[in-house]
Amino acid sequence: MYKWIHQFGSPKYFYDISVRLSKWIAIVCAISFIGGLYGGLVLAPADYQQGDSFRIIYLHVPAAWMSLFVYLVIAFSGAVSLIWHIKITDIIARASAPIGASFTFLALVTGAIWGKPMWGTYWVWDARLTSELILLFLYLGYIALQSAFSDKRIAARAGAILVLIGVINIPIIHYSVEWWSTLHQGPTISKLDKPSIHLTMLIPLLLMVLAFKTFYITTLLIRARSEILEYEYNSSWVKKYVIK
Amino acid sequence: MSKFSINNLECVRQNNILFQGLNITIKDHGLLQINGANGSGKSSLLQICSGLIEPTAGEILWNDKNTKKYRYEFQSNILYLGHTNAIKSSLTVEENMKVMHAMAGTKSKIDYSIILEKIGIPNTNEILTCNISAGQKRRVGLTRLFISKSKLWFLDEPFNALDEQGKKIIEKIIIKHCKNGGIVFFTTHQEMEINNYPLQNIHLGNNNA
Amino acid sequence: MLEYINIFYVIFKRDLTLTFREKTDFINSLAFFIIIVLLFPLTFGSKSELLNTIIPGIIWISALLATCLSLETIFRSDFEDGSIEQLVLNRYPLILLVSAKILAHWITFGIPIIVISLTLGVILSLSNEIMMALFITLILGTPILSLLGSVMAVLTMGLHGSMLLSILILPLSMPVLIFSTIAIQNASLGLPIVAETYFLAGILILAITLAPIAAASALRIRLS
């Protein structure tokens, strides 16, 4: 197992595998994206309360899930690279950050657009939205710290410490914000905790979740490949690939 | 008998291979000078040996124990002096020495005035270090050589900013330390006049071309 | 054991001495704090009900901003003059030495902030309940800021621009700010503040346990 990790951790191996994988994952992503959108925007019935405006959940919900998921991925790979010094996890963390930040941004924007018909205003200090906003700042801090170092190895490990502290902090942040928002406005309208969601609505949503996840993996692999080339530009195999 | 060895050491900085496959074993009484042009990785080698930075490959052993695993056991046997003096300019000379003394962990009482006299800056105990010259500051930093009881010394350019007399004093204390069973690694780009003691040399550089 | 206490004390005392001799940074960050707090009565007028509701929050925000400023200096000179290498390559655990530095920072920064805040509270005639809540939240909250901030200070030391430090600290210190201001609001309404106090104490304990470890390993990483 350990040996396998090390083999997988070698940048060349990762590069080769990712070239082969990313094509198939991209295809899965495209299919589920089209399917999810069609199902969500055309097939699913309008919500009896919110009408058609609910359909934005097909972007908002997967984006919000992914925003946290990517942060956890960064934290996990940060922990791995701190403990075992595996290069590839440095690269994964580094390549994931801008994607995660974009998901967070998307979740905020779609949340705001959704908020307009729901609450009559683009921004409400809803607990989820506020934590999402703080998460965006955590991402921005991580990216800023990464770009402040010229040595990528140090950048990755310094970032790992930051993101691990962030991960410990996220539940505290979420809880504090929830505490604060219930105090200020009474219980907020919870968007997702509806006891039952109709199957025709649920399946497109799950497809969209799959689409977002595969989109993340595809872009991650592409970004990671260019990071690897930059990281390893001195090694012989990179020279061979580039010339080819 | 103590033994310090580095095995198959490699250092890559900013995608530049500074050195590769470096092996050194050195025992008590060893005096080793690291030579090489600017940027050849002399300081990096000292920093790697002391454990300050991690090598990209290879291991460092102190008495056949990996220094990374037995970090504090190793660290209580070393003294590292970098380019900088590591003294505080708004403390007096003696206050600085007190901090060094505490960090060195030696319990014995030390007469700071005698050490200052030995190193050629007598009666400076009460002066703030921001008010003395660069050479004198270097000497204050180097009083660690008198305070420390560590066996293994890593000295990065110890003769920088020193005049002839200061250089002689430091050479003398280095040789005395080796004669007493210590081990010294140092870098310098100045001519050394160590005639009466066997000096080992390693040369770094030109393998990154 | 005695050795460890001794080295802790030496580093602690060294940092205190340095702060008091190099007064400017120390005084500037406290002056910055006072000025920000005083800006608000000047902009919002001096009606006491309004001030009673916003001043405690303002004190907290100012303390947070001033912390960002003051933390920049905690490792700066050590980093520049090479003392940090001596701390790292020491026979004593780095966590211990870093803790001494963090404690020194809190003593020279957190305590003055608390004292000044309470004085400002008296001058601006805050009610007793609010003063009490302010005191409790500050005494639990400022050490959290020092601990958390020192890790960020290590991560950013030697990198140009103190903006980065603030960007890292501010989002992470949001819970402290939120719990503290909720506690103060509750106090002003005559409600109990036990829950928030417990939360702050919990975060403080978490920070005391983890921050020195994080700061020490961040130091090693930054030097490599």
Image (spheres, coloured by chain):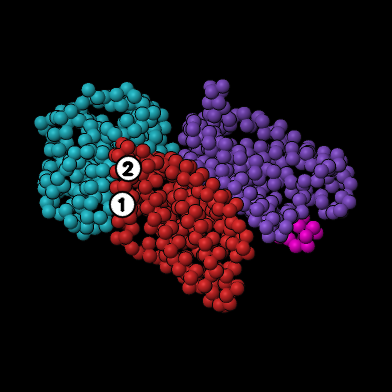
The answer to whether B144 appears left or right of C128 in the picture is left
Q: Residue at x 22, y 48 (%)?
A: B97
Q: Amino acid at mark 2?
A: Ile
Query: Chain C appears in which tint?
Result: red
Q: Quadrant of the C terminus of chain C?
A: top left
Q: Residues within 10 Å of mark 2 (few under 14, many from 20)?
A: few
* Residue B149 is a magenta residue: no
* Residue A121 is a magenta residue: yes
Q: Residues within 10 Å of mark 1 (few under 14, many from 20)?
A: some
Q: Is residue C17 visible?
A: yes
Q: Which chain is cyan?
A: B
State which mark lies toward you, 2 or 1.
Answer: 2
Q: Residue at x 14, y 45 (%)?
A: B111
Q: Amino acid at mark 1?
A: Lys
Residue underneath mark 1: C13
The answer to whether B107 appears left or right of C32 in the picture is left
Q: Position of residue B115 (x, y in %)?
A: 14, 45
Residue underneath mark 2: C5
Q: Position of residue A185 (x, y in %)?
A: 71, 60
Marks 2 and 1: same chain? Answer: yes
Q: Residue at x 38, y 30 (%)?
A: B68
Foreground of the two, B41 or C202: C202
Q: Chain of mark 1?
A: C
Identify the magenta region. A112-124
Q: CA distance from mark 2 to mark 1?
A: 12 Å
Sequence-earlier tag: 2 or 1? 2
Q: Which chain is purple?
A: A
Q: Residue at x 40, y 65 (%)?
A: C28
